[in-house]
Amino acid sequence: MELHGRSVRDDVRELGQRLGDAVRAHEHAAAYDAVEAARTAAIDYRRGDSEDRTALREVVADADAAGCEDLARAFTGYFELVNLAEERERVRAVRRGDAADDLADSVAAAVESLAADGASAADVAGVLEDVRVVPTFTAHPTEARRKTVKAHLNRVRALLEELDERRLTPSERRRHWARIEAIVEALWTTRRVRDRQPTPFDEARDVQWYLANAVYDVVPEVYDELEDALADHYDDPPDVPTVLEFRSWAGSDRDGNPFVTTETTERVLDRQRRLVCERYVDDLDDLAGVLSTADDRVPDDAIADVLAAAREESPRVVESAVGRYPGEPFRQAVAVVRERVDRVTDVRPGGYEDAAELTSDVRDLLAAVRDAGLDRVADEHVAPLARRVETFGLHLAALDLRDHREKHTHAVAEALAAQGVDYAGMDEAERVDFLTEAALQDEPVLDLADTGDVGDEAARVLDRFDALADWHREYGPEAIDAYCISMTEQPSHVLEVVFLADQAGVVALPEHAGVDVVPLLETRSALSNARDILGTLFENDAYGALVDARDGTQEVMLGYSDSNKENGFLAANWQLDRAQRTLAAICEDHGVDVRFFHGRGGSISRGGGPMNEALLALPKETVTGDVKFTQQGESIAETYGNPRVAERELEQMLNAQLRSRHAAVSETDPSLPDDWEAAMETMAETARAAYRDLLETEGFVSYFEAVTPIEVVENLNLGSRPASRSGEREVEDLRAIPWVFSWTQTRCILPGWYGLGAGLAALDDDALLREMYEEWPFFRTTVDNAALALARSEPEIAAEYAALAPEDLRERFQPRIDDEYERAVDEVLSVTDRADLVDREWLRDSLDRRNPYVDPLNLVQVELLSRNHRSETAERALRLSVMGVAAGMQNTG
């Protein structure tokens, strides 16, 4: 049976034609002719039909500001539509694999792999108990598109799906294409560039959309696949516990963002509770329509517990349900649950106090439906709701608070100074002793509701902890139960948060700890000193009690972005891998379970890449089964914008974690061969030296400013957070996102490979390198990710940007960068024993499809950057070119 009626070529061609029609209909003929001339010239050069890019340069040079804007808008619009076409092709591939029952990296494939390895049902049950995959959505500013544009594209996505998967009559197909033409026309006439910076609440609403739609919809389907696979391979399959959880930083991440206030976080918590309750109410309405079973077919006490619990809270709710559905006990129970969910978000009594109560009622209902012999109804209609309630609770996604450690230190020092305590004058050991004693004593040191005369920044920190106690009372501790400390360098940085949480009443040691305190280790010094930091904390009376109160688990976050920016790609990856093994050993020595939180960005340069491959490449001794990782910006849209893609991504993550955890408990010796470790030390140190030498060469920051659109990126209104921590233009101070974003725009993805060539060349042993590549997942994934960054780089286009720099800077830096690029390419091809950097046909096809259309955007950008005095139209065109390149590269920062 043919599953699809179209191909990616069909979609690209026909969507491109509709875009061309919109340009022709709404712009003057010269604009359309310029777009076509640029497109043709770019394709001719890429095909080898033209010796150079002279024709393309002439089209761009002849364009005035309005003409540049037309060019940028046309090619940006093209990529927005092409991205939809390629997403649809990915869905086709998933459906074909599903139909052929050979879908790689699925949960079914993971269970089959475990069974083939001889894992018993008990073994698998143990793995399942350990596994928990926790995507954590952040609001980091890497999503370049306006919400209005995304809404239009969602409409096109839905119509393409119907054209591809439904058998339509000719008239139905014409109507579908007429609708697509109308949307493309609307897109062409829609302003692309944001005219204001989004607020943190705007960003939170955006994240919530994905959580309350695609994620909410597909979670039960992932569990169904897992349960079916277990039933296929085991006579007595183990029960599947909760293995998926979702968290968010949107509206609660205060690090470097002064616009995230306690009021913002309060609004986010309230809206998330309302959203998830609305989805439950919709599900319960559907369930009421299905569960019409008469009372003579239902055991007498089937729903007694559900009604009894509700009767204690609000007897009128039960009376109303019984009166509305006489003789239909299941509907009575559903009506009661629905009413209690509805009352969670209003002032009427009788609503659920916490998610545990709701979970208990839904589970009781599920058991009652099964007891009545309605297993199919239970599986298809009640079990999905139970899985959702267990996954999303009454909070949709738990929030993590985060702030920079300096903010806590200053707040504690100022607040204590008002109490006559010279915290600022203490050394590290004195601070640790003071904070420990203060956290363990019964009497509070500070009144967070009346902190006296402290500065505004300190007041905001203290107010946040005071509000945290209120949020726990209002929304439950599970709604906001982690506090991440950026740039942790000392034990006192962690104990300061414990102290403030204690003063708020969120922590009352040794009995109670309502929050995980999570050090974020991201600098070379912090990662190198991890043993001292954590060892001191675990041996500390107060912190040891907190870990015990949190089920003996310590969460540690690893920062990929700043580590890469500081040390370079290869050195950062090795340092992080080595740090994980060190941290796992420290925790094991102290009898503490570790949960790693991987702070990965969307790009290769910031720890991005296929998440399932990244999980499989983690050191085996660190794979406890419980793992968190960040997802942000455009990667959220790409992963969770389409329900079928979202389901596939979640399955791949679970596949990796199930296989990794099984391997971790099955294999006895996870240590690396000595020669591999020694080789990595040599290569990483050489690569770091080369990278740092580039950054520390006099004039590098000036060169970076001259050859990248950093000023445009900083003012693009991508997100609510400032582009740098202090406003200074230094590489150390610049945030990792604009640093990577700016280089990506120039098609010189330097943060993803610079130093790699030097590092690989430092090891004069090709056989050893190939052995490491073939047998060591970490090394293979690292090299493959760098290969992708190299493949996306285009030295000829980068040279166009380099020409913007003063001659002395250009001569100082461009040859060095070009030489390292060539060396990295040669070394990667040698290590992988490949003729091409890209070894996946679909990816090569995608790059070949995209490159000719990104080129005009790059040249428009270079042309506009070269103009000293730009009109408002030219500035708008420049910002639009940045968004277009991001769409074409499918990557920002």
Image (cartoon, rainbow, N blue to C red):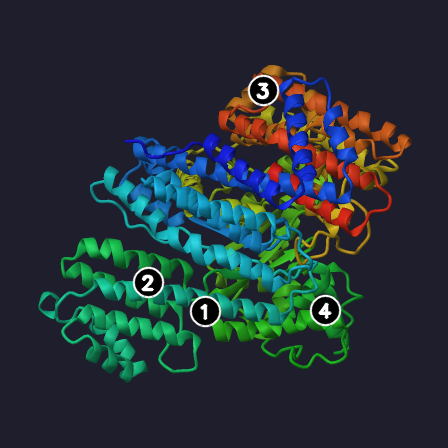
User: 610 or 3: nearer the eye?
Assistant: 3
Estimate the x, y position of residue 476 in percent, counting from the top left. Answer: 47, 70
Residues at marks 3 and 4 touching, judged by CB atoms closer than 8 Å? no
User: 891 or 400: nearer the eye?
Assistant: 891
Mark 4 vs mark 1, CA separation in Å: 33 Å
- Label 4 or label 1, whichever comes before in sequence order: 1
What amino acid does circle 2 point to?
A: Asp
- Give the labeled residue for mark 2: 283
Mark 1 vs mark 3, CA separation in Å: 51 Å
Mark 2 vs mark 4, CA separation in Å: 46 Å
Estimate the x, y position of residue 85 in percent, counting from the top left. Answer: 49, 38
What amino acid does circle 1 point to?
A: Arg
Residue drawn 60% across and 68% down?
264
- Label 1 or label 2, whichever comes before in sequence order: 1
In the displayed orientation, state which residue is furthest to the left.
296
- Label 2 or label 4, whichever comes before in sequence order: 2
